[in-house]
Amino acid sequence: MSTIEPGKTELSAKEILKLLPHRYPMLLIDRIVDIVPGESAVAIKNVTMNEPFFPGHFPDYPVMPGVMIIEAMAQGAAAFTAYGENLDTEGKVVLFMGIEKAKFRRPILPGDQVRISIRVAHRRPPVWRFEGEAHVDGKLVTSATYSAMLANATI
């Protein structure tokens, strides 16, 4: 079970590390705010020029890859759900099951702060379905519906 104090409405990067197995360079969220347990939250991603994907995507016009935006949405949902439902994530991973209705409306660039709104659309543990929207400066940049499950991390 989570060792993070229950009832918080915000999670720091340090607390997110306790909930997710992701580490640099794959940890893509910096904070979670506005937590409403079992319902919704907002994940924050501060995009910097130092992101490891920018040198190759694209050197002369750095744009955050769509798959990384979706991954950030999923990580936000995973951390929010693990915390809100006090899930035991030790030795477990959250695995994608499906991505639907993904739309990319504007590029995300270095210097942007991405606010990812996450809403639980359906839950039947160990499976959850989420609706997510990513905004930069109040403008919708990406939206998607996605599902994931909590699974044992075995190889």
Image (tube, helix red, strand yellow):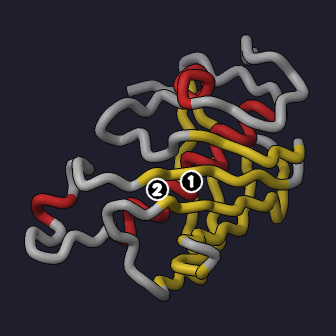
* Mark 1–mark 2 distance (CA, rounded to whole Å): 5 Å
Locate the N terminus and report the quarter of the image it occupies: top right
Seen in the picture, residue 155 relative to 130 is either above or below; the reply is: above
Q: Which mark is residue 104?
A: none
Residue 132, percent across and down? Answer: 66, 67
Seen in the picture, residue 103 relative to 68 is either above or below; the reply is: below
Residue 137, percent across and down? Answer: 57, 73
Q: Which mark is residue 71?
A: 2
Q: Residue at x 45, y 25 (%)?
A: 154
Q: Residue at x 24, y 55 (%)?
A: 49
Q: Are marks 1 and 2 in contact (CB under 8 Å)?
A: yes
Could you say whether the residue bearing mark 1 is in a helix, strand or loop?
helix
Q: Is residue 60 left or right of residue 10?
A: left
Q: Is residue 14 left or right of residue 48?
A: right
Q: At label 1, which amino acid type do we have?
A: Ala
Locate the C terminus and report the quarter of the image it occupies: top left
Residue labelled with disc 1 = 74
